Every structure is written in structure tokens, then in C-alpha cells.
Image (cartoon, rainbow, N blue to C red):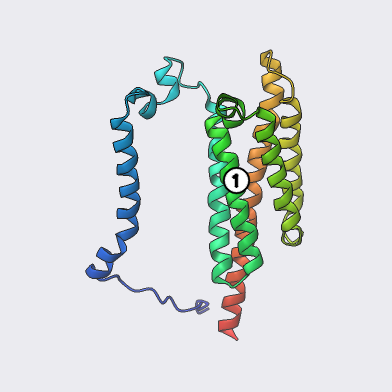
Amino acid sequence: MPPISGPADRRRRWTPREQILAIGPLLFFWTLTATLLWVSAEQDVVPTERLFLDAASVADEPWYTGLLHEIGVLGWTVAATAALAGAFVASLASRRRAAWFLGSGALLTIVLLTDDLTGFHSEVGPRIGLPKFTTIGAILGGSVVWVLLNWREISRTRWLILLSSLGALALSVLVDVERRTSDVHIFFEDAPKLFGIVGWATYFVFTSIDLTRSAVGRRVGGEAA
């Protein structure tokens, strides 16, 4: 039985000149990195080890200190990356609503990631005069606006996963209303949060996969016709 032929692979080898030109984005991001490193070296407020070393190492704590928190940060990162990739595919396929839906979802996820990574709502914000629940309210409001603006696109996805994730995150916020007083309280606040993050990442990964399959299948079908 002869192999089934697919669409032609239009890729080609890059010439040395094209390779040199293509390194531009790397140089740009390396410049940003070098600037960040220069600033960290010039400042004398925060010890260098606190900026470069793992928090557990600096505090002389066991390696597993904050492990579940780091898994949560990775979950937000996976979700943001998947959403951005899906938005890119959607833009290539001229699906503007889907591109906006996933792109804005990625932006919202980055906000959630930044808050979780820095502890902004609980630590940084209050120190600069921004109440904890003001930050939480702003994030919740932004999330509601995102859902309302994109409910048509959401209805075409595996929305039950998203609903489950939002429910778990909402439960975490409700528990966070009270001040942490024990390990039990911490568990019942952060456990739903981790469930919510994993669900959030799962939703955006599969949403981007489904959209990519749809876009590629439509393109291949059009070329075959």
C-alpha cells in the first residue's frame, strides 16, 4: 500500500546570511538580560545571592521548601505559553476572535503568574499602600471581564474544564479571606489554588491543541481539494 502523501514541506535550509539576520531577536533579549544583570550588579540594596540563588538555599532550608508553590508557578507559565502559541496559530489562520480570546487569556495568566510569583497581593502591595483585597478584587474583576468578553469563544471550547478551574480558584480566594493561622488553614487555601492552576493550564493547553488541529485540518483539506 503506497504511503499517504500529505502537503508539501516548503521549508528549506537557511543560508549563513539568513542565520546571522535571524539572530536579531536573540541579541535583543540578551540586551535586556544584560541590562537586568547590570542593574543587579550596580545596586547595593539587595545582596546578590538573594537575586540569583534559590530561596531555599538562601534561607538554608530543605530543598523541598516551597516546592508546591513552584509547581503552581510552572502551571501558570505552561498556561500562558500555550495560550500565546494558540493565539499565534489563530492569527495565522485569520481567526481574529480566537486570537484575541487566547491572547487576552495569556495576558490575564501573566498577571496571575506575576502576582503568585511575587506575592504581590499579600506582601508587596500592602507595603506600598495597596490593600490586599483591592488587588484581589482587581484580579477577580479582570477575570470576569475576560470571561464576559470572550464567552462566545469559550462556549466553543472545553468550558467545563475552565469552569472547574475557576471554581477551585474561587474557593481558594474565599478561604484567603481569613488570616492564615495554622497549617490546616494554609492547606485548605493553597490546595484548591493548586487544583485551579492545574485546571487552568489544562484548559489552555487543550484549547490551543484543538484550535491548532482545526486550523491545520482546514488548511490541509483546502489544499487537498
The x and y percentages for residue 198 are 64, 40
Q: Which residue is mark 1?
A: 109
30 relative position to 80: left or right:
left
User: Which residue corresponds to the image point at 65% horizontal and 56% vertical from the top-left?
Assistant: 207
207 relative position to 151: left or right:
left
Out of 9 and 53, give the one closest to the viewer.
53
Out of 24 and 216, give the one closest to the viewer.
24
The x and y percentages for residue 211 are 63, 63
Q: Is 162 located above or below residue 19 in the figure?
A: above
Q: Is 55 located above or below residue 167 in the figure?
A: above
User: Which residue corresponds to the image point at 71% horizontal and 37% vertical from the top-left?
Assistant: 137
Neighbourhood count class around disc 1 (C-alpha, 10 Å): few under 14, some 14–19, many 20 upward = many
Quarter holding the C terminus is bottom right
Residue at the extreme left: 16
The x and y percentages for residue 119 are 56, 29
SS category of the residue bearing label 1: helix
Out of 176 and 214, give the one closest to the viewer.
176
User: Which residue corresponds to the image point at 69% horizontal and 30% vertical from the top-left?
Assistant: 133
211 relative position to 36: left or right:
right
Out of 215 and 177, give the one closest to the viewer.
177
Residue at the extreme bottom: 225
The x and y percentages for residue 27 are 30, 54
User: Which residue corresponds to the image point at 60% horizontal and 70% vertical from the top-left?
Assistant: 215
Residue at the extreme front: 129
At label 1, which amino acid type do we have?
Thr
**Residue 206, located in which quarter of the rendered image?**
bottom right
**Residue 18, located in which quarter of the rendered image?**
bottom left
